[in-house]
Amino acid sequence: MYWTVNGNGHIPDVITVDLRTDTISQPTQDMRDAMVNAVVGDDVYGEDPTVAELERRSAEMLGKEDALFVVSGTMANLIAIMVHCTRRDSEIIAGDNSHTFRFEQGGPSQIAGVQSCLLRNKEDGTFDLNELRDKIRVDSDVHEPVTQLVIVENTHNMCGGKVLPLEWLAEVQKISRENGVKVHMDGARVMNAAVYQKVPVSEIAKYVDTICFCLSKGLGAPVGSILAGSKNFIAKANRVRKVLGGGWRQAGFLAAAGLVAIDKMISRLEEDHKHAAKIARAINATGSKICRVNAATVQTNILMVMVDRSKTSAKEIVERLATVQPDDPVRVSVKTSCRDPGFFRIVLYWEITEEYVRAAIDKITMVIKEFDDKFMKRSDRMDVIEC
Ligand SMILES: Cc1ncc(COP(=O)(O)O)c(C=O)c1O
């Protein structure tokens, strides 16, 4: 999924800090115990009590009538699109930097058969509301498709874990309702948003018709996402999940870990946010002109490090971060991810404790100084910024 670099984890004196993504987080011991002891049944027959409990608790938490446990965030978004887009001439509206558009293999067109209309994502993960109004197409012209769904992403992955403002969501809901269009939230990391905004997640979910969140990212569960909405929507979603091959039998083993995720892992997400901010401050404190983070906008567990492309590429920095050379004073391999020459991404999760954050900062600052020394004349360097 990302350009990744094999670290040096096999070298005994090297610490590897893997900050590529939160999907690599491993289940906690509590999750492992819960999985071993789970009471299960055949979920396709609706007979798995642990899945039923996870769905009931998730729906309650989100303030929705019902919920469905599905394999992944990608499947949750695709099911939502397939249920909401009831006509063959459907169009969806989404941000041009949205996960649904960029990284789900074109599922909306490939499988759901719907056309995507893209609005330019702003840096904060939103898009322009006037543009939204202008782009909605109602059933009034035989030449045009009909807008059936607007998708918003919260937190916004490619915008660096940004949290969508509640007032903006309220406007999206209003405009969509006025035009008979539904709103789905790709809330893969919406729990991070709720923690950042210090609101119950239902306060966010109330602005959308349907929402999904991932148990398997910052919440640490091994597999699975939740899709929630009205009872009628979930009944249809259950049918679509089955045709996509997502009917899983004794899924209660996985749901048991999901229950631990919602009970014990949401309240600790704040720690990941603090770690992300700490790394951002440390990067800016180097005074580097090559690598910068807009520290004021680091809100949750993701940060994007911007790289001056006229000097080097993010890929080169990413490779150097992951490598430990024989005479390196800092014996740490930091894995990060990079999709664009202009930036690389760092993501925090529960296993990245304070000690690992310190080790990562040592390595990241060492590498940044190395690149600055290599590419910048002394006089070009910025003064160290106090953050
Ligand atoms: C915002 C967002 N939505 C959806 C997904 C897809 O989730 P999954 O990997 O479970 O399919 C991701 C994955 O990283 C994501 O970041």
Image (cartoon, helix red, strand yellow):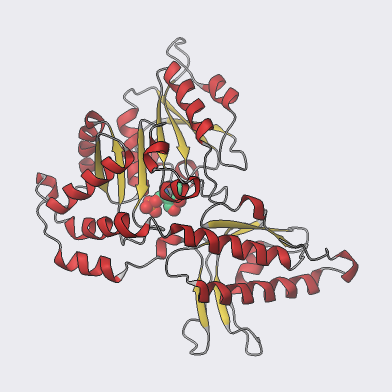
Name which quarter of the figure residue 201 lies in: top left
Where does residue 76 sit, x and y in percent of width and height?
33, 43
- Give 31 or 251, whichever is nearer the viewer: 31
- Estimate the x, y position of residue 355 in percent, counting from the top left: 52, 76
Q: In which quarter of the image is the C terminus?
A: bottom right
Q: Residue at 56% x, 41% y: name it.
A: 125
In this rendering, the count of numbered labels is: 0
Above or below residue 325? Residue 102 is above
The residue depicted at 11 percent of the width and 59 percent of the height is 39
Specify whether 202 is left or right of 292: left
In the image: residue 69, left or right of residue 287 = left
Q: Residue at x 53, y 31 (%)?
A: 168
Q: Which of 39 and 243 is in front in this view?
A: 39
Report which quarter residue 346 is drawn in.
bottom right
- Rendered view: 31 above or below 231: below
In the displayed structure, 330 sits above or below 75; it is below
Closer-to-camera residue (177/308): 177
Q: Where is residue 73 in the image (x, y as percent from the top left)?
A: 36, 48
Q: Is residue 107 visible?
A: yes
Can you give x and y, in whole percent of width and height, for residue 164 in the image?
Answer: 52, 40
Residue furthest to the front in view is 198
Specify whether residue 77 is in view.
Answer: no
Q: Is residue 20 left or right of residue 228?
A: right
Quadrant in the rendering for residue 319: bottom right
Q: Is residue 119 left or right of residue 68?
A: right
Residue under the point 59% across and 60% down: 277
